[in-house]
Image (spheres, rainbow, N blue to C red):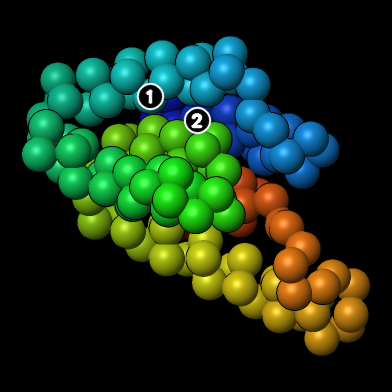
Amino acid sequence: MRNLTYITIWLMTVSIMDIRSRKISIWLLLSGGILVLATCGNQFAAGSLALYDILRGMVPGLLLLAIAFVTKKAGYGDGMVLVLVGMVVGGGKSFVIFGVSLFLISVFSIILLLFRKVRRNSTIPYLPFLTAAWLLI
């Protein structure tokens, strides 16, 4: 439970960094990776998370990384953070968190477009919506 609180704080930190600079520090990603590995190790040892579930949880993040590589429209940091989140929550919840985050960013984007605050080609940081989905789920 304590590790999940640390992951929440880490997600809030990367969200703020994403909003401010649209880049995620490699050191912040590495620290999140260490935190996630410790959490997965604890969950695996307790029997609450299986290796198969950890691997399934990585799928949405790997999909986002592939999209970033092919289209250059998504960030690699976004995909890496989603991979790490997916490792912690497992297969089922990672797809739900990914879906909810996409829904939230879509609603936000539509509102901004309706009020003419952004244009069609504007970029919006993704990680705040991933953090919101993490908190909701």
Most extreme residue toward the bottom is 114
Q: What element carries label 1?
A: helix
Report the amino acid beneath label 2: Ile
- Which residue is identified by label 1? 36
Residue 44 shown left or right of residue 58 in the figure: left
- Could you tell me which residue is drawn at 71 percent across and 80 percent down? 110
Which mark is first along the chain, 1 or 2?
2
Q: In which quadrant of the rendered image does the N terminus lie? A: top left
- Which residue is identified by label 2? 7
Measure how far apart labels 2 and 1 are at the Cα level: 7 Å
Quick check: marks 2 and 1 in contact, CB under 8 Å?
yes
Query: Where residue 122 appears, x then y in whole percent?
Result: 77, 63
- Could you tell me which residue is drawn at 82 percent across and 86 percent down? 114
Q: Does residue 105 show up?
A: yes
- Could you tell me which residue is drawn at 38 percent across and 24 percent down? 36
Report the amino acid beneath label 1: Val
Q: Is mark 2 on a helix, strand or loop?
A: helix
Instruction: Please tell me in which quadrant of the rendered image residue 27 appears.
Output: top right
In the image, 131 versus 122, the foreground residue is: 122
Asked if 67 appears above or below 48 in the picture, the reply is below
Q: Does residue 135 show up?
A: no
